[in-house]
Amino acid sequence: MMTEYRSGLLFPLFRQSVSNSYTQVFFAKNPVLGVLLIVVSFFDPGAGFGGLLAVLTSNLTAYFTGLNRNKIISGLYGFNALLTGLGLGLHYQLNLAFVIVLISAALLSLFVTVALEGIVSKYGLPYLSLPFLITFWITMLSTRQFMNVQLSERGIFTLNEMYLLGDLQLVKVYLWFEEIPLPDVVKYYFRSLGAILFQHHLFAGILVALGLTFWSRMAFLYSVAGFAMAFLFYQMIGSDINTLSYSYIGFNFILTAIAIGVFFVIPSLSSMLWVILTVPLLAFLISAGNILLGPYQLSVYSLPFTVVVMVLLYHLRVRERFHDRPALVGIQQGSPERNLYSYFVNRKRLWHLGRLPMSLPFYGKWTVTQGIGGQLTHKDVWKYAWDFEIKDEGGSTFRNDGNKAEDYYCFGKPVLAVADGFVAEVADGIADNHIGDANTRQNWGNSIVIRHAEGLYSQYSHLQRGSIKVQRDQYVRKGEPIAACGNSGRSPVPHLHFQFQAAGQIGSATLDYPFAAFLKHGQHQQFFASAQPMLHDVVWNHQPDPLPDQALHFVPGQTIQFEWIQGEKTEKVVWLAETDIYNNSFLHCKDSGSKAWFIREPDIFYFTHFEGKTNTPLFDFYLGAYQIVTGDNPGLQLQEDITTAVFPMRALLFIHDFFAPFWPFLRIRFRIRQLRPQGSLDGSSIQMASEVEFRIAGKTIRTKNFHLVFDKNQLNEFSIVDGKTTKTLKRV
């Protein structure tokens, strides 16, 4: 704390906390939108003053009472106070009694926010504008007993007020906007946008729409779609359309469309269908709410939006199936576009994160001779299983005439535990079959089941009699030999049957679960961070190499220095390895402020997303080292997509944002291959070449090439070829 006072930072990032308190009304953190919303809030000076004072009160109190700084800066403790202040500032005249009431209401809003945060966060839900509703209703009811808090007469003589504020010219501007020949649905939409900030002017709604579009094209698109559906619904049921314009309820459809359509879920056709589904639900709550609250002279305000969004989000979180219809946002990046583009590339690339990594249950290269949903035995609830055998270069599974079990390459070979765990079940003593025979009575043969986690087991079957090295309740380590491949049970030829399952009994129903970090033989070696081998695949476990693994081991607090060589120009580049409060790691360019977020695992290094300037060495490194397998595998090739959020043609990307949930036509393709090893004076080095293609509707419009050299346990050199330009980073 003393450091902050000495440096003059009594309240770090104070302006951002104020701006974000306004933009959080739309779930955003964008300074341009923040400025526009602050300006719009002062279209009614009383409302603007009330909103700003409430935000300052809430945020300062949150800071000096020790609440989480990041939440304060993000506006999470300020936006409900803002709504409370805007509403009170619109309803009451400005005097000392009102200021006291306003500050008290802002404090109440903060306390209710913190309390509700603790309650709803247990269910993974946001509290939305529920603190505002509770605070505002309590304040409106209680102030009826306060004689010195007087109702405002602003809005009754609007043109007179305009004349006093800005003379005749402001009156003319106001009338011009009000008389613009627009369809009713468009006017009602803009009015409803303005009503979110308790403003009724058409121009207010237009400015908010511009700011919303600047922040997120998808949010604007879905807000229009949601409101248009509501307008159509009201016409179909014969309800009063004017209520969407002349009360504070039309914005419920807009905010719900943004929340359910693009912010808390990944924008898609299915999320649009959910937006349509919410329209009648909101209409019901609006009508019923007005009837219930009418006798108390209270409006429903944002109650329908809050209830519907919280209920639907909870519904989506407890699903057991169809998790991608629509998909919930995993890591919130504060932008629907970034969330969607990251989802496109990471739903397969990083889908295994959070899962327990399972290695293949053997040494060396084995072939899948029966895969998932196989032709013989892998059916129904037992379909997620594999049969593995060893084949020679000619494709044969045995030597000699294959009449004896010992002729088969896999017979007697070690079977390994795929992960740490406790042995749950063991069956031994079943004789190995003669070739061509099968023991259908003891179907699984000699088997082992290992418990790795609650509801996650692995089963190894048809093991060789007498080869089992473990017993029930014994703890085993990943990669530890537990038995040998055999030919027991329903097994006409030696092979290893393997499956994941949710229960600990031998022969339980199989579980759809992947293996981690394995290689597949083909025209080129392929690496899979997480996947399920297919029929005829030749697979083996990946072995990390210390050289690239250590070179990409960026420790928090580490400083990495390079020389950035561009022709005859050389400058110093400094990167810092840092982590955020959630322990997410990133490289931070000291000069540009850019950040490249990454994940490092024993077998692979990933960049996940980038923030900042794209004309920096860090951005080129993000592209060229987007995904690196940390092993010595000459000839290994890897191909992935990079998030479209970093597409270089910003104007085209702006247009693409409107279409991306339904038709993404921009793409960034990444390829990397490991080159043949080259010796160095101090030992081996590993070199890799990567390529990034920028595509429009399948056509490549630009290519960047990269070359990486790992030596002495560090990245020594990184070169970029972009057209005729060559740039190089050299480690200092």
Image (spheres, rainbow, N blue to C red):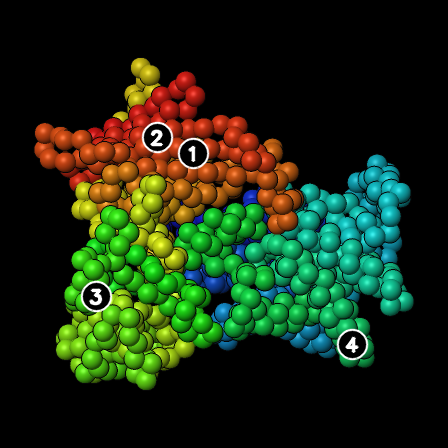
Q: Residue at x 47, y 48 (%)?
A: 345
- Above or below: residue 60 compared with residue 729: below
Label 2 close to label 1 by CB (< 8 Å): yes
Q: Which of 60/711 is in front?
A: 711
Of the two numbered discs 4 and 1 in the rendering, the one whose residue sits closer to the viewer: 1
Q: Earlier in the sequence, mark 1 or mark 3?
A: 3
Please provide percent x and percent y for residue 647.
51, 36
What amino acid does circle 1 point to? Val
Q: Residue at x 21, y 82 (%)?
A: 430
Residue 479 visible (yes or no) = no
Q: Alpha-carbon distance for marks 4 and 1?
A: 56 Å
Residue 188, quarter of picture: bottom right
Question: Circle 1: is it few (<14), some (14-19), or many (20+) Cα within 10 Å?
Answer: many
What amino acid does circle 4 point to? Ala
**Image quarter in which the C terminus is found:** top left
- Residue under label 3: 403
Q: Alpha-carbon distance for marks 4 and 3?
A: 80 Å
Question: Circle 4: is it few (<14), some (14-19), or many (20+) Cα within 10 Å?
Answer: some
- Residue 706 is tagged as 2
- Residue under label 4: 288
Of the two numbered discs 4 and 3 in the rendering, the one whose residue sits closer to the viewer: 3
What amino acid does circle 3 point to? Asn
- Above or below: residue 140 compared with residue 676: below
What is the secondary structure assignment of the residue under circle 2? Answer: strand
User: Is residue 176 toward the left or the right of residue 299 in the image?
Assistant: right
Label 2 close to label 4 by CB (< 8 Å): no
What is the secondary structure assignment of the residue under circle 3? Answer: loop
Q: Alpha-carbon distance for marks 2 and 3?
A: 54 Å
- Residue 692 is tagged as 1
